[in-house]
Amino acid sequence: MEIEKIETSLVINTLEKFYSLLSNDHISVSQFFDTLPKVANFCINIHPMYNNNSDFLILFNHVYQLMSNLHQKDTINYLNQDNILKFKRYELLSFLEQFEVSIIKELQFNLFLNIHNVEMRSIKMEHVKSVTDLKNADFSFKKNKRDALVYIYSGEVQQQEEGNFDFYIAKESILESKNSLISKLNQFDYYKRDRFYLEAKLDSLKKRQDIRLLLAGSSYTMCGLFEKQMPLPARNVAVDAQDLYYSIKSIRTALDYNPNITHCILSFAYYFWGYDLSLSTSLYQYKRVTEVNYPVFKDKHNFSGVLEDRTQTFLTSITPLRKHLFLFDKLAEQQIKKIKESFVDAHYFPYPRVGSAVLKNDEQTNHQLAQKRAASHNKFFKYQSTVEENKKLFADFLEEMNSKGVQIILFVPPVTEYYRNYINPDLISNFYECMEPLKSKFQFTLIDLFNSDQFESGDFYDYDHLNDRGAKKLGKILGKELDI
């Protein structure tokens, strides 16, 4: 079915309106519910025109699924949970954008403007056929189906200007989008910060060829080891909730960037063998894949979802047409570069962590919180297929590190007596059943600090993470194990 240009511009303009509405971070569940039927009706109406467009069919099927779940009694409660609505919005936005971009790519854009009102350097010239001062406007190619006419105006559109263009964009709204993007980038959420932090630490190794020691793993390394305290020039590439797969990914990436690294300290908790971040069902760990590790490594491991267009969440405040015509991506790159520069030589926490939950809470609370924390780890050894995958993964990794002459030091992190009391003993015995065969085949050091008496309650920030005082102790213990 041949689509007229007026129909194409109408579809894009409607998509832009939906995108603007749904990208608003202040949208409520009721507003989301009100918008969905409108999106659904729009998709039904344009289905005859775009039923051969694969991106449209993906959007259509996704909206159909959302509408099917709309009237289930638990849906509102589900969406009211923390971050669920945001995730659902981003999911729908990604499909809307994917479809709109597929249409936009078929057009040639001709911009008409008052040159004095718009900075030319903000225009993405590779996507623009022509830029013309409105005084010299020539509409002779207006009927060409591929030529889209865009009017960049300031103030109000004059009556004589109405109807001459396919798209109207106010200069003031471009500046508003720019400010919104900068604000969004500077308002860190937990995942965005960790992504930029990890990228900054890894990228810094391209220049810092003097780094000899890599500190890797999960939050036990992130919290528990300071770069500046180590006896060798060190870089800490650990982030929260990291599993074995992504820890090894970090180490290999670091070695690609800096082959001069000779030592690596890796936190290896008892539950690590059965832990696969990409198979987790919790929203928090889901987002550790989609918004931290995938954007950094472009590797989703065993994650079954589609991720390609869901990682640039800091650009969701900008509509697809504006992203196509203006250099918002370059602006984002400049802002991100500044953010990353602040992370390069910094410790993960920019403030002192000197308190202790153990000392602050009463005995009953300590037991309750420690039991809850230990229970979240005890479950992992039941995932036998993950255990087997991780055993092979780690054996291959050790063989590679031995061949490269990189000294590997593993440490089981110290914990409080409260946490220790609730860990399943089978988790510990199974840990060693997996580790012992590797010790006879490969060169590495394992330091088990789980029952260490070198740490006291005041050294812990919570029940299994050290505060700054405890981190200094850990650094001294592990530093002595380095062959230097």
Image (cartoon, rainbow, N blue to C red):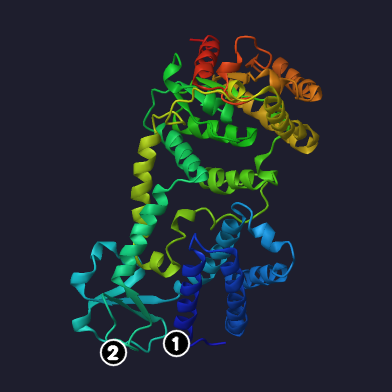
299 relative position to 206: left or right = right
Q: Residue at x 33, y 66 (%)?
A: 174
For label 2, the residue is 159
Q: Quadrant of the N terminus?
A: bottom right
Q: Is residue 41 above or below residue 328?
A: below
* Residue 233 in view, yes or no: no
Give percent across and percent down for residue 193.
Answer: 47, 42
Q: Using the rendered view, name the quadrant where residue 63 is placed.
A: bottom right
Q: Mark 2 is on which residue type? A: Gln
22 relative position to 177: left or right = right
**Which sits in the foreground, 52 or 430?**
430
Give percent across and percent down for residue 17.
Answer: 47, 74
**Which sits in the foreground, 250 or 464?**
464
Give the foreground label among 1 and 2. Answer: 2
Q: Secondary structure at mark 2?
A: helix
Q: Using the rendered view, name the quadrant where residue 257 is placed.
A: top left
Q: Is residue 187 above or below residue 166?
A: above
45 relative position to 138: left or right = right
Q: 10 Å neighbourhood of mark 1: few (<14), some, or many (≥20)?
A: few
Q: 10 Å neighbourhood of mark 2: few (<14), some, or many (≥20)?
A: few
Give percent across and percent down for residue 337.
Answer: 36, 44
Q: Residue at x 71, y 34 (%)?
A: 376
For label 1, the residue is 6
**Which sits in the foreground, 440 or 382?**
382
Q: Is residue 48 above or below residue 375?
A: below
Q: CA distance from mark 1 to mark 2?
A: 19 Å
Q: Secondary structure at mark 1?
A: helix
Q: Earlier in the sequence, mark 1 or mark 2?
A: 1
Q: Residue at x 73, y 61 (%)?
A: 74
**Which sits in the foreground, 194 or 203?**
194
Q: Residue at x 36, y 31 (%)?
A: 207
